[in-house]
Amino acid sequence: MAGHVGNHTATTNSSRLNERIEWEKNFNKEQEAKRIAPIKKLEAELARNAGKIEAENLRFELQQLRYRLTHEPSQDFQAPTYDGRFNSATEVEQAIKSAAASFAAKHPEDVTLVTQFLRQQPVDVLIDASREDVWELALKYIKAKEQEVTSKYTPAPTVAEPEVLTPYQERFAELDRKLEDLKPGTREHDAVTKEKYLWELKQETIGGGDEGFSLCMKEICDDSVTSEYPDGLIIPSDVLIKFRTYLSGESGRRYKAGLARKDSYRSTLRRAWSNFTDTSFWASLEERAEWDRIRRNDSCSADSMKRALGCFDGSQKTPVRAIR
């Protein structure tokens, strides 16, 4: 019989140790993520600033390119030359105006740029500007030159890293998918909803979802290492879940105000754990004295509180009227 009890105890301790290890591992991951977050934010800010500089450089280089294209001849531009098919200069001028108008109807934002570009081409080449396809070739040439400049500033596409989910998050997502396939109000839907709530509570409790709670509970475990308890507290996850339920229930109303304030969250949670487990060996002497004082005040009757505050005269049986 003794051997059976010993094996059971060893199994329980092993299970609790595994839970403690899992808790600390998730807690450390959360802390590492919070440590890296400011670094990533700074890197993103630097990248944005670098992007602004590159954008300004690109704008300036495109301006220089467009200036050269509209003020200097482009020797490598190739297009059909004039074949002398018109009988007079007036006919040539009318044909050029017609081609320009047709081109402007299709590319109103580019017509000025292309017009200035064609005017700068060598006179001895006699490019046939009376043909609309020549205007299209000129625009294609300009866009190709701009693309050469733009490609130098175009960053390589970045592939987003896949999000790595914790076991708690994976299970939570799986339960969400189950709920989508179940009809609300059915027994199966209610069972999955309850399981989802428990997993959410477990994620907050031992998965690092609630940094304040996890940090305080880890601190309690660390503070519990004494000569009498060299291994310290190893709190099973089911106990932590019961503690969270205790805090959110009727019994936890007395802690609600303290837990809502950042400056009193830690001290209130430690006092709540002491009351919940009826232990305080892990607390400091100052904390124990303060908790004893609060317990005595909580156990006082209305009459004893009045006496402590001086509302009773020693010879009188009725309260003394307050001074108005």
Image (tube, grey):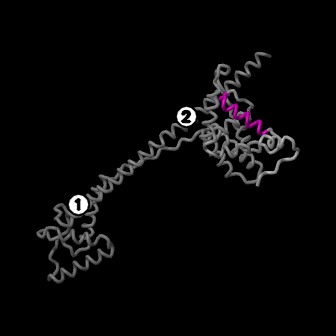
Label ID, residue 274? none
Residue 210 higher or lower than 150, as above or below: above
What residue is disc 2 on? 28
Q: Position of residue 300 (x, y in %)?
A: 80, 39
Q: Position of residue 180 (x, y in %)?
A: 67, 52
Q: Position of residue 10 (x, y in %)?
A: 70, 21
Mark positioned earlier in the residue sequence (1 or 2): 2
For label 1, the crowd category at 10 Å Cα-Cα, with few meaning under 14, some 14 to 19 and many 20 or more, is: few
Q: In what quadrant of the picture does the N terminus appear?
A: top right
What residue is disc 1 on? 64
Q: Secondary structure at mark 2?
A: helix
Q: Please name whichever residue, 151 or 53, is drawn nearer the observer in this view of the structure.
A: 53
Q: Which residues are magenta?
A: 282-298
Left or right relative to 12: residue 52: left
> What is the chief secondary structure element of the magenta stretch?
helix
Q: Residue at x 82, y 44 (%)?
A: 312
Q: Is residue 166 magenta?
A: no
Q: Is residue 297 magenta?
A: yes
Q: Please name whichever residue, 61 or 181, is drawn nearer the observer in this view of the structure.
A: 61
